[in-house]
Amino acid sequence: MKTWTYLLNRLVSVPPTILMILYFIFIIFSAIGNPNSFSTGIPTFSDSLSSYLTAFGRFVLEVLTGNWGYITATRNTPTYSGYVSTLVEIYFFSTLEVILIAALIALGISFPLGRYLGTHHTYKLAKVLRSITVIGYLTPAYVVALVLQVLLGKGVIPGNPLAVFPITGAYDFTALPAGPSKPAWLSTNGVLVTSPTHMLFFDSLIHGDYVLAFNSLEHLVLPVVTLVIGITAIVTSLLESGYTDNMGMEYVKSARSRGVSERQIAIRHVRPNAIMPVLASATIMVAFLISNVVMMEYVFAYPGIGLFLITTMQFGQYFPTAVIIFLLGLIIIFMGIAIDLLHFVKNPLIRY
């Protein structure tokens, strides 16, 4: 099968999947009632089949055209105020900043660690590291976040010398530029918005505000470590399994007989095959990462898409919830297609 044929077959399944996600969300909110009182044009559901189908059609149209409603800040709600599409864009990039940093660190740790565990089974250090990896894999993200807050969070345990990191938010107001007018790249009208990337740490570096960059980095440490622990545990376990399965293969024995060093065998011969389990499970890891992000942001009150999702649900603004679930579903769908395509290219068994 050719690559473009495989890609076309995968893309054909996308529209029905999207429609199923939207219908799943729709029937949940049909039971709740009107998804969001702040949205305009969202129908009231009834028992009539024609009205039900019409309501679903309008719901799909609203979501797909980006008419996601408007949130107005009140005394009983958070400071979110504005079009849902704008807020989702802001908080999505805030979450993306944490994910990018965590993913880079986790992959940098996982690949050498997975190779070590897969090629040194009997070493005592390998057994200890393997136990730590299992614990990291089994421990929920919110538990890891709470433990990190207690051990390393400022003000949690008085007199703790390790308590040097903030436990809430993405920045301190005292770190923002002083003066009546803010720089053109920074806006603080209820929600902090930076440009051009909408990622506070990177935008601060780009514009040379190193005080704000360092402050935002301090706030990133514990959320990033929370995600790194989970990602590293999964990727390391998969890589270890891949190395273990391949180290006894005939091509490895043949390389040893030719005098190839163990390090070269592991890196040049085994690693391309050991990565296959990681690629095969990457879609599941993306879903796992998204669920961890939601829990992490809630525990640390980190202003990202996960906290926005939970907060809007708590205050009964359900249409933003529907939109965020839909967008997260899209991310998983297209990430899955990209990963499957890469797996298809790398693995000749799938092509033939």
Image (cartoon, rainbow, N blue to C red):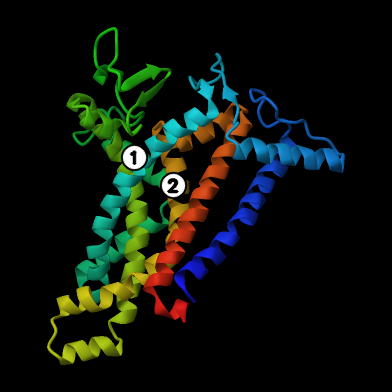
Lateral position of residue 1 relative to residue 65, left or right: left
Vertical placement of residue 166 versus 254, above or below: above
Tell me, for residue 97, which label it has, or none: 1
Report if residue 288 is visible in the image: yes
Figure quadrant of residue 49: top right
Question: 10 Å neighbourhood of mark 2: few (<14), some, or many (≥20)?
Answer: many
Residue 20 x, y percent position in the rendering: 66, 52
Read off the residue under disc 2: 292
Q: Earlier in the sequence, mark 2 or mark 1?
A: 1
Amino acid found under the numbered disc labelled 2: Asn
- Residue 298 in sight from this viewpoint: no
Q: Nearer the viewer, residue 275 or 195?
A: 195
Query: Relative to the observer, which residue lies in front, 122 or 301?
Result: 301
Q: How crowded is mark 1: few (under 14 residues within 10 Å), some or many (20 or more)?
A: many
- Spot the residue most to the top: 180
Closest to the observer, 42 or 9: 9
Mark 2 and mark 1: span between their CA atoms?
15 Å
Q: The residue tagged with tag 1: helix, strand or loop? A: helix
Query: Is residue 304 toward the left or the right of residue 271 in the image?
Result: right
Q: Residue at x 66, y 50 (%)?
A: 19
Q: Which residue is drawn at 74% across and 32% down?
A: 33
Residue 146 is marked as none
Left or right: residue 30 versus residue 149 is right
Q: Position of residue 76 (x, y in %)?
A: 56, 17
User: On screen, 177 above or below 243?
Assistant: above
The image quarter in which residue 271 lies: bottom left
What is the three-letter code of the residue carrying label 1?
Glu
Left or right placement of residue 64 versus residue 139 in this view: right
Residue 291, above or below 179: below
Residue drawn at the location 54% of the way across and 39% of the way down? 324
Q: Secondary structure under badge 2? A: helix
